[in-house]
Amino acid sequence: MPLSPMPENVRVIVIEDSATDAELLLRHLERGLGRIKCQLVDDEPGLQAALDRGTWDVVISDYNLPGFQAPQALGLVRRLEAYLPFIIVSGVIGEETAVEAMRLGADDYVMKNNLARLVPAVERELEANQRRRQAREREQRFSAVMQALARRVITLQEQERRSLAAELHDDVGQRLSALSMNLAMLEKAVRGGSGDPFPVLADSRELLETTGRYVRRAIAGLRPAELDSHGLIPALRSGAQALQARSGMACAVSGSEQRLGAALETALFRVAQEALMNAAKHSSARHVDVVLRTRPGGGALLVADDGRGFRMADLGSGVRSHWGLLLMRERIEAVGGRLRIVSAPGRGTRVVAAWRSAA
């Protein structure tokens, strides 16, 4: 991110009890920086009031004032403004004292007999503070995104659990209840020695078979057995066939069946799964290709559909509307890969997850 231009009015707190020294210092600043907004203070209450009243770019402090030294001023500034540049300007400070002041958090020190160093020191600290501020803003944005993402993941997990619980109750639960009733009827028939048990047995067998098919579908939705036993391409083919049967969207899967390692295969499978679901739900695609290409040192998984596509600029329009894309990116980056998405209105969408093998 480029740095902003130097502010039109540099806002400076000067801690100095000598009017002559303060005037000399301000002349140097105005010659080098242009217009200055200055607040002159000489004690702790004055500094506290200045910090409370306004926003400042830099604090310039003499070291020794009657009853108020630079370390005290520095401590007050750091408690209220952790990153506000603090420069000591003194005529009596020794090297050991200056080193100790820097250890306590001062950003620089300038001798009063060498004020030519003052403006470069201020410019340097203003630029450094701007970089720190930009870094903090990036960290805050990243933290906000990650917190929102974590909350969304938790919400999605709970939604999936509720959905699975409801399906198990409505499907498996009802079949098991029917099977229990059949067993009770069989028990009654056997004990009484009357009635034909074979229709009940046939119905029970059908209940078991349909329940087994449902449970296998549920397991495949959570994590297909093919992914662990046969690898990525067989698992993708199985998932693509199921999606094609549900949505009518033609799905073609091709590529090397070379095993890639459990973590990478899982990440690629989830990326492809999300991209296929997006194509089926949002793009009105008629056909989607899934292609896995491997080579020495890495490879790439491509998911390309012929749907309506979208404007790439819309990807940056908000976090909440693109959870799937964020999750895909997080998954592939977690295994050292990178995600690239290319789309345009009427031109379909291409999702590429690329990786490099460890040397």
Image (spheres, rainbow, N blue to C red):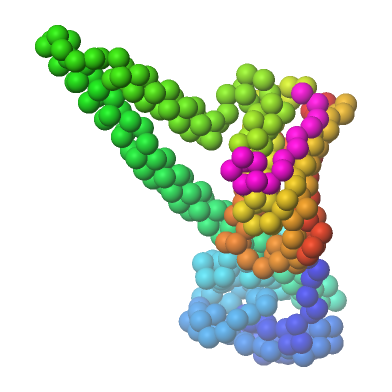
Examine the rendered structure and indicate whether residue 19 appears above or below residue 319: below
Task: Specify the quadrant that holds the C terminus.
Answer: top right
**Residue drawn 62% across the image and 24% down it:** 226
How far across and how far down the image is residue 8, in percent? 76, 87
Examine the rendered structure and indicate whether residue 126 appears above or below residue 39: above
How far across and how far down the image is residue 207, in percent? 37, 25
**Residue drawn 69% across the image and 41% down it:** 272
Seen from the viewer's position, the closer of residues 308 and 319 is 308
How far across and how far down the image is residue 318, in percent? 63, 66
Q: Is residue 252 magenta?
A: yes
**Residue drawn 54% across the image and 80% down it:** 51
Q: Is residue 50 magenta?
A: no
Seen from the viewer's position, the closer of residues 94 and 29 is 29
**Residue drawn 54% across the image and 75% down it:** 68
Report if residue 125 is visible in the image.
no
Answer left or right for 354 relative to 40.
right
Seen from the viewer's position, the closer of residues 39 and 318 is 318
First to last magenta residue range:
243-257
Q: Quadrant of residue 123?
A: bottom right
